Image (cartoon, rainbow, N blue to C red):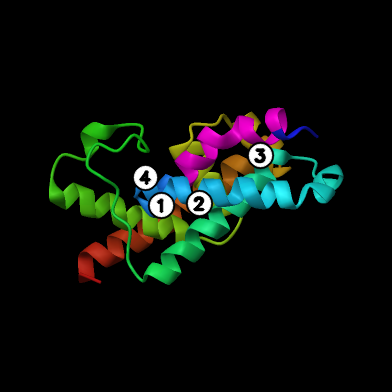
Amino acid sequence: MDFRTDILAHRDRLYRLALSILGDSAEAEDVVQDVMLKAWERREEWGAVEKPLAWLAQMTKNAALDKLKKAHHQPLPEEGSAQWHNPSLVTTPHHSEGIGLITRLISELPPPLDDLVRLRDIEGFSYAEIADKLLLTEDQVRVYLHRARTKIKEKYVKMQKYGL
């Protein structure tokens, strides 16, 4: 494995993943820089890594969630943030708060459901790409993604209904 082609090539995707969790571009950049450094320091493990992007994405997700825990705050994406495919959905403070809540609900999903939602709905990966990255079948990706979206919807509706 080569650092430039197999690690650095994924920097932009890792940044978008960190940004989707943290909602802050400077913090996301810090996380990606830390992950790049950690990947370099763990270069003796590269031979055992079958899917570099999945390995890096897991490290990025963990680092971003750790950063959130340390900061003790709930991230709210900036209005019109590029992390969402349809920035027109974020038009009012109320919508922005809803997007922040959904981001939090995604981060609360168990693996691999959280990764599936991020890869498909935030990163825009195809079902085939996700199946390849997470070592699942395309059918499993569709089923798990449906379950993840259902859980997010149920929690979101419940929280909106009861003001939690």
- Helix, strand or loop for the magenta stretch, by majority: helix
Between disc 3 and disc 4, whose residue precedes?
4
Instruction: Indicate the secondary structure of the residue bearing disc 3.
Output: helix
Instruction: Inspect the image, locate mark 2, and give the three-letter code of the amino acid beneath it.
Output: Val
Q: Position of residue 14 (x, y in %)?
A: 54, 41
Q: Which disc is residue 25 wearing?
A: 4
Q: Nearer the viewer, residue 47 or 40?
A: 40
* Residue beneath disc 2: 31
> Is there a contact, CB below 8 Å, between mark 1 and mark 4?
yes
Q: Which residues are magenta?
A: 4-18
User: In the picture, which quadrant includes the N terminus?
Assistant: top right
Q: Kindly report the distance in space between the C-alpha atoms of the residues bearing marks 1 and 3.
A: 20 Å
Q: Kindly report the distance in space between the C-alpha atoms of the residues bearing marks 2 and 1.
A: 6 Å
Asked whether residue 16 is drawn in magenta, I would say yes
**How many other residues sit within 10 Å of disc 3, few (<14), some (14-19) or many (≥20)?**
some
Question: Which residue is at 60% across, 34% downward?
Answer: 10
* Residue beneath disc 3: 53
User: In the picture, which quadrant includes the C terminus?
Assistant: bottom left
Q: Is residue 87 left or right of residue 67?
A: left
**How many other residues sit within 10 Å of disc 1, few (<14), some (14-19) or many (≥20)?**
some
> Is there a contact, CB below 8 Å, between mark 3 and mark 4?
no
Res. 89 image quadrant: top left
Question: Which residue is at 35% across, 50% downward?
Answer: 23
**How many other residues sit within 10 Å of disc 2, few (<14), some (14-19) or many (≥20)?**
many
Instruction: Indicate the secondary structure of the residue bearing disc 1.
Output: helix
Q: Nearer the viewer, residue 25 or 75?
A: 25
* Residue beneath disc 1: 27
Between disc 1 and disc 3, whose residue precedes?
1
Instruction: Inspect the image, locate mark 1, and give the three-letter code of the amino acid beneath it.
Output: Glu
